[in-house]
Image (cartoon, helix red, strand yellow):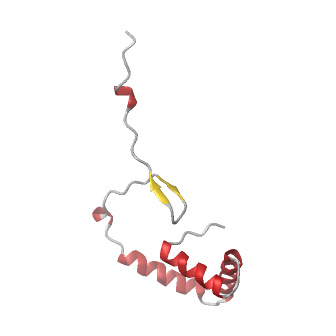
Amino acid sequence: MELRLDYETQLKVEKEALRLGMELSAYCTEAVEWCCSQPDIGARLAARLAAKRAAMPAPDTVPDIPTTFIGTGTHVQQLAPQPDSSQNKPSLS
């Protein structure tokens, strides 16, 4: 399972796992198992997602954001646009 966490959240999770003397993967497993045992977790998660969506800007006000990234959740590198090399090729005729 892949988890995508922002840097601050990842630090908190790692710190808590260390405090409990657990491997990070074991701590995350426990967290997921706990969530599954909560009878109202679906409703709580749906409310949280709805609140996040409501706080997002309207689609026409979202700035252009490059969509090509490589790296892990905490080490992301934006790839630079590649120049159009077809314009620089010499003609064969």
What residue appears at the point 40 percent right and 40 percent down from the top-left corner? Answer: 82
Answer above or below: position of 67 versus 7.
Answer: above
Closer-to-camera residue (15/43): 15
Answer above or below: position of 92 versus 10: above
Q: Quadrant of the N terminus?
A: bottom right
The C terminus lies in which quarter of the figure?
A: top left
Q: Position of residue 16 (x, y in %)?
A: 61, 85
| Residue 51 or residue 75, whichever sits in front | 75
Q: Position of residue 9 (x, y in %)?
A: 51, 78
At x 55% / y 75%, what residue is drawn? 10
Q: Is residue 41 left or right of residue 52?
A: right
Residue 87 on image: x %, y %: 34, 26
* Of the pair 38 and 89, the residue shown nearer to us: 89
Q: Write the residue at 37% across / 77% down.
A: 54
Q: Is residue 91 left or right of residue 45?
A: left
In the picture provided, is 5 more to the left or to the right than 28? left
Left or right: residue 75 compared with residue 14: left
Q: Quadrant of residue 59?
A: bottom left
Residue at image location 47% in from the left, 78% down from the top: 49
Instruction: Estimate the x, y position of residue 56 in percent, counting from the top left.
Output: 36, 73
